[in-house]
Image (cartoon, helix red, strand yellow):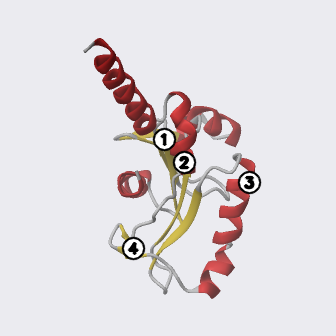
Amino acid sequence: MTVGGILVVLLVLALLGYIWGLGPLNRLNTARGITPPAKLAGLDRITDQEIRSQLQLDQTREALSRINDGKQATVEAYGNLDGNRMFVVIALRGKVDIDKTLADSGAAPDQIKRVGRATCVESAGNLPTQCYRGSNTLTVIAQSGNDGVAVDAVAPVAEEAFNAMK
């Protein structure tokens, strides 16, 4: 009975480690694929190879995976072909230190905003508006592909992408 109880406790801990990205099973979690949704924020995922090539989506995904120890990553664009509303979404398995990333980006403290569970940076200079949403197992960055987009418009995209790709 005691051995059975210990095995059940170990199994539960292993499962929680996998799901929450803690302990030795975190490695299995970071190897899981990321399936991007077909639609995000009411916009279709851009699948046209010519446009994907122009946006360098696949090259960016490969570089991210390479510099992050082979962790699964995806880089997708969602929008209208006329370009009046577009978002680029980057998702990476594992935890990214969002505060450090923002500090390294050079964003001024007054540009950083919390919107729901997302941490966002307002557009400045040549940097687009970006919102980060992360956990121990997944980090999502959503950025506007258009000028003048407020953090209130990008944060829901980051949250929706995070929930869809968990």
- Mark 1 vs mark 4: give the one in front: 1
Please give the residue where the numbered disc 3 appears in the rendered image.
Answer: 66
Q: From mark 4 to mark 2, how far is it between C-alphas?
A: 19 Å
Residue appearing at x 71%, y 68% in the figure: 59
Q: Which mark is residue 137?
A: 1
Q: From mark 3 to mark 4, how far is it between C-alphas?
A: 25 Å
Please give the residue where the numbered disc 2 appears in the rendered image.
Answer: 93
The mark that comes first in sequence, 1 or 2, is 2
Please give the residue where the numbered disc 4 appears in the rendered image.
Answer: 38
Q: Amino acid at mark 2?
A: Arg
- Mark 3 vs mark 4: give the one in front: 3
Q: Is residue 96 above or below residue 67?
A: above
Q: Is residue 8 above or below residue 78?
A: above
Residue appearing at x 67%, y 80% in the figure: 53
Q: From mark 3 to mark 2, how far is it between C-alphas?
A: 13 Å
Q: Amino acid at mark 4?
A: Ala
> Residue 157, percent across and down?
39, 58
Q: Amino acid at mark 1?
A: Thr
Q: From mark 1 to mark 4, how far is it between C-alphas?
A: 22 Å
The mark that comes first in sequence, 3 or 1, is 3
- Circle 1 — which element? loop
- Confirm whether residue 145 shows in the render: no
Q: Is residue 149 above or below residue 163?
A: below
- Confirm whether residue 46 shows in the render: yes
Q: Quadrant of the N terminus?
A: top left
Find out whether the residues at labels 1 and 4 contact each other: C-beta distance under 8 Å. Answer: no
> Residue 127, percent across and down?
64, 56
Find out whether the residues at labels 1 and 2 contact each other: C-beta distance under 8 Å. Answer: yes
